[in-house]
Image: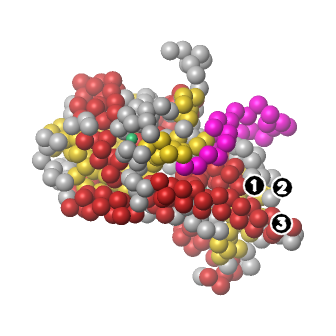
């Protein structure tokens, strides 16, 4: 289909995991712009596109899904998200590489394929431990950047046909990796089939996704944006893979992005037996209330509470003459600001380390993105910590700001003020 004539949004119908269609409504945030569509400053933003953003939960497999799916060609061909060059992430990627090698006895020289490989940083960590790598990423500029750092990258979406092409041209993979990409893909059944074909018999598919239970428990509603089509529990992933000749064999909980799971999946005819942690986590999920409507209704209630409390707090500070700015310009911040109705009346600017974002404005709120140096020269009284998932790293390196009387507003799981007294 021609890129210009296809519908930019698809309303979901059946569940992409189990084909069910009994959906519980969870939250609905109305139309919001795409969270990574940072804009050039302009006199008017009247023509900024916005798309409905809402989440429903499948009463059969408890996949949480967006109600509206934006065409990936619109989302990813010109994509702004680059893996942040934070210390936390660099350490995490080395950890993931070592974990995969040690748990699944990857011999040196094993072939590792990563979908959504972005600028190649994760695969570079696999090269460092002696693996052969291939990236697949549709964002053409990012794929080129990865090539420059020595990570060969196919500039394409990972799909069934891509998997078969890789198999034919490069041979089977010992490890297929999908970090924070699986939740972005609509047709995950096709991906599961492609993965099954590309894996060698002892191969492993390692999928890292934000953990739905962390989102529900810690009110992380800002994880919801148009790129994140799915919010997964282990049980839901087990249902999915079980339908496609695969099985979940191990799970590791991780702190990144507000709480994530790294789920290891093997072929159902492969040598990897499920470890006890898999059933244990599925039981814990049931005990938590994964299958009960009330769990989702209560989450929605707490989100609505933050949606009132946070803007009231920020507005009262501004009314008292305090200067407030954002810290970080992550995609999730745009959901947070959009849901809370916060914009340039409240936040003067937001600082971010990502060079690509400098000089642009945030989608929706149009708050200007400035450099960290600008923040040092014009320190506000309060930073709203939009990148709250790096709270430890950021608060650690901003001691001076705090010691000079500055404060952070940490929005999630509950709006909280952090001052030098809390160090
Ligand atoms: P992420 O959660 O998707 O990795 O995005 C984090 C954003 O926060 C990214 O745009 C970089 C920014 N950031 C800073 O500006 N300063 C920091 O110290 C850290 C850790 C992140
Ligand atoms: Zn389902």
Identify the mark at residue 342; answer none if there is no mark: 1
Q: Give me the disc on residue 345.
A: 2
Question: Which mark is first along the chain, 2 or 3?
Answer: 3
Q: Secondary structure at mark 3?
A: helix
Magenta range is 26-52
Q: Is residue 46 magenta?
A: yes
Dot 3 crowding, Cα within 10 Å, few <14, some 14–19, many 20+: some
Q: Is mark 1 within 8 Å of ligand 1?
A: no
**Mark 1 to mark 2 CA distance (whole Å):** 7 Å
Residue 83 in the figure: left or right of residue 41: left
Residue at x 23%, y 45% (from the top left corner):
247
Is residue 106 visible in the rendered image? The answer is yes
Q: Which of the two discs, 1 and 3, labels the residue nearer the N terminus?
A: 3
> What colour scheme has been applied to the protein in the rendered image?
secondary structure
The reply to whether dot 1 and dot 3 touch (C-beta < 8 Å) is no
Residue at mark 1 to residue at mark 3: CA–CA distance: 12 Å
Q: Position of residue 242 (x, y in %)?
A: 25, 41
| Residue 9 % position (x, y) | 58, 28
The residue drawn where x is 48% and y is 31% is 13
**Which mark is drawn over residue 138?**
none
Decide: few, some or many residues near mark 2? Use Cα within 10 Å; few <14, some 14-19, many ≥20.
Answer: few
Q: Position of residue 366 (x, y in %)?
A: 76, 46
Tags 3 and 2 touching, CB below 8 Å: yes
Viewed as shown, does residue 304 lie left or right of 144?
Answer: right
* Residue 158, image x, y percentages: 38, 32
User: Quick check: is 10 in the magenta stretch?
Assistant: no
Secondary structure mostly seen in the magenta stretch: loop
Q: Secondary structure at mark 1?
A: loop
Q: Quadrant of the C terminus?
A: bottom right
Task: Decide: few, some or many residues near mark 1? Use Cα within 10 Å; few <14, some 14-19, many ≥20.
Answer: many
- What residue appears at the point 65 percent right and 68 percent down from the top-left corner? 415
Instruction: Determine which of the numbered discs, if any, sits on residue 318 in the image.
Output: 3
């Amino acid at each position: 289909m021609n890129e210009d004539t296809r519908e930019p949004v698809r309303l979901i119908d059946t569940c992409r995991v189990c084909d069910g269609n009994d959906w519980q409504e969870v939250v609905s945030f109305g139309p919001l712009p795409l969270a990574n569509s940072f804009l050039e400053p302009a006199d008017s933003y009247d023509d900024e596109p916005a798309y409905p953003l809402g989440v429903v939960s499948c009463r059969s497999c408890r996949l949480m899904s967006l109600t509206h799916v934006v065409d990936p060609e619109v989302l990813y061909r010109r994509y702004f998200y680059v893996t942040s060059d934070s210390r936390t992430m660099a350490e995490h990627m080395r950890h993931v590489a070592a974990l995969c090698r040690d748990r699944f006895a990857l011999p040196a020289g094993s072939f590792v394929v990563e979908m959504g490989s972005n600028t190649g940083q994760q695969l570079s960590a696999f090269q460092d431990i002696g693996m052969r790598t291939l990236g697949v990423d549709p964002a053409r500029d990012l794929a080129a950047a990865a090539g420059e750092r020595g990570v060969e990258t196919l500039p394409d979406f990972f799909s069934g046909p891509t998997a078969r092409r890789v198999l034919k041209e490069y041979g089977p993979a010992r490890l297929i990796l999908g970090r924070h990409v699986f939740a972005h893909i609509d047709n995950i059944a096709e991906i599961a089939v492609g993965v099954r074909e590309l894996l060698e018999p002892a191969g492993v598919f390692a999928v890292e996704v934000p953990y739905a239970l962390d989102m529900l428990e810690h009110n992380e509603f800002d994880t919801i944006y148009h790129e994140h089509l799915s919010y997964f529990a282990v049980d839901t992933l087990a249902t999915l893979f079980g339908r496609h000749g695969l099985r979940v064999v191990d799970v590791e909980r991780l702190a990144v992005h507000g709480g994530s799971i790294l789920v290891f999946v093997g072929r159902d005819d492969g040598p990897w037996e499920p470890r006890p942690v898999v059933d244990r986590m599925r039981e814990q999920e049931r005990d938590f209330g994964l299958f009960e409507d009330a769990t989702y209704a209560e989450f929605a209630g707490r989100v609505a509470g933050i949606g009132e409390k946070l803007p009231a707090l920020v507005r009262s500070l501004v009314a008292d003459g305090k200067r407030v700015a954002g810290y970080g310009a992550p995609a999730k911040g745009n959901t947070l600001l959009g849901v809370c109705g916060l914009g340039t009346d409240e936040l003067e600017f937001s600082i971010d380390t990502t060079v690509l974002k400098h000089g642009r404005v945030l989608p929706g709120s149009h708050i200007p993105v400035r450099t960290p140096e600008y923040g040092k020269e014009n320190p506000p009284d309060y930073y709203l910590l939009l990148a709250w998932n790096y709270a430890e790293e950021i608060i650690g390196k901003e001691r001076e700001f705090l010691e000079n009387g500055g404060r952070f507003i940490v929005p999630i799981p509950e709006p909280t003020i952090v001052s030098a007294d809390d160090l």
